[in-house]
Every structure is written in C-alpha cells, then in structure tokens.
Amino acid sequence: MARYFKEQDIDEFRECFYLFARSGQITNLDELTVIMRSLGLSPTIQELISYLKKKNGKMSFADFLDIMHQHSKVENLPNEVIAAFKAADPQNKGTISAKQLRNLLQNWGEGLSVREVDNIFREANVNNNSTVRYADFVKIACAPVPDYY
C-alpha cells in the first residue's frame, strides 16, 4: 500500500489506527467508524459494513490501508460540497453571500456555533457583508488543519 500513500500519510494512519484499535486489529464497526472519521473521511454506514465484511470482521493495519485506498477513490469531499453549492446556484454565478453561507453553516446538518463560523470566516478571509466564491471557500475549508493549531 505504500505505493498509494505518502509516508507521512501512512504514519498518520498508523497512529490513528493503533490509538483506537488497541488490540492491533479493528474488530467492530465502531472502531472502523471512529478511525476513518478521525482521519477526515465520511464513509456511510453501508460502506463501513461492506469494508468490514470484505475483511471477515477483522482488519489488520495492512487491511486498513487497503480499505483507505479503496475509499479514497470514491470520496472526494471538496468536489461533493462544490456540487451541492452549484445545485443551489440557479444563475451559475459561483458565489454565495456571506450571510447566506453563515446561515447554512450554522443551521444545516450538525450546525456550527457562531464562534466556529467566525473562525472559519477569519481563516478564509470572509467579511460578513461580502460575497464568497464558494469554490475558493471550499478549498480553504477542506484543507487539512496545520500542525501548529
């Protein structure tokens, strides 16, 4: 699997894997869910069940790398988010008002707090009265968090 991931990524996967799979193997759906979501992926429950079934209910780290490779080919979160914005953009402007974006972030799905949205806006250099190019915003919002945070 080393041919599919950078060494730094494998180290991150290994650290997360052994943090949650203390026995050295993933043996249940909860462990697999926590590990993959901790690594920033968003597999569905059906995908997780399927991955665990493929490995007969037990998954070593090598098996986990295989699953990570398979899943990384099907999940592309930034493109999925941009597609959702485009679907709600009938004029195809490529922009959304900051006020509208704030409303979406705070009131849809799990809903972020005012403070969390303020932090995201500050990081993305978004002014509350501005118009936001959603493709640029998604790139910033989906970027990995720097190590110094």
Image (cartoon, grey):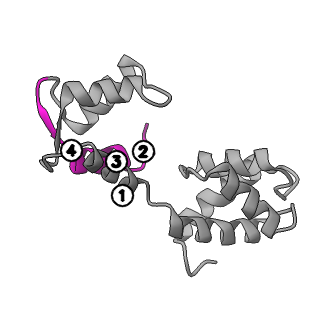
Q: Give the quarter of the image for residue 104.
A: top left
Helix, strand or loop under label 1: helix
Three-letter residue code for mark 2? Val
Query: To which quarter of the image does residue 11 belong?
Result: bottom right
Which three-letter amino acid code belongs to the residue tagged 3? Ala
> Picture coordinates of residue 137 (x, y %)?
25, 44
Could you say which disc has been placed on residue 108 in the image? none
Sequence order check, earlier mark of 2 and 4:
4
Closer to viewer: mark 1 or mark 4: 4
Q: Are marks 2 and 3 in contact (CB under 8 Å)?
A: no
Q: CA distance from mark 1 to mark 4?
A: 15 Å
Of discs 2 and 4, which sits in the foreground? 4
Q: Badge 3: few (under 14), some or many (20 or more) residues near its Cα, within 10 Å? A: few
Residue 88 image position (x, y, % from top left): 27, 42
Q: CA distance from mark 1 to mark 3?
A: 9 Å
Q: Magenta stretch: residue 133 in it?
A: yes
Circles 4 and 3: CB atoms closer than 8 Å: no
Marks 2 and 3, how far apart at CA? 23 Å
Give the labeled residue for mark 3.
Answer: 84
Q: How many marks?
A: 4
Q: What's the amino acid at mark 4?
A: Asp
Residue at horizontal 59 percent and vertical 57 percent from the top: 12
Residue that carries the numbered disc 2 in the rendered image: 145
Q: Which residues are magenta?
A: 129-149
Residue drawn at the location 28% of the way across and 26% of the way down = 102
- Badge 1 vs badge 3, beta-carbon distance below 8 Å: no
Question: The C terminus appears in which quarter of the rendering?
Answer: top left
Which is more N-terminal, label 3 or label 4?
Answer: 3
Q: Read off the residue under disc 1.
A: 79
Tell me which label, 2 or 3, sits earlier in the chain.
3
Q: Is residue 112 left or right of residue 133?
A: right
Q: Which residue is mark 4?
A: 89
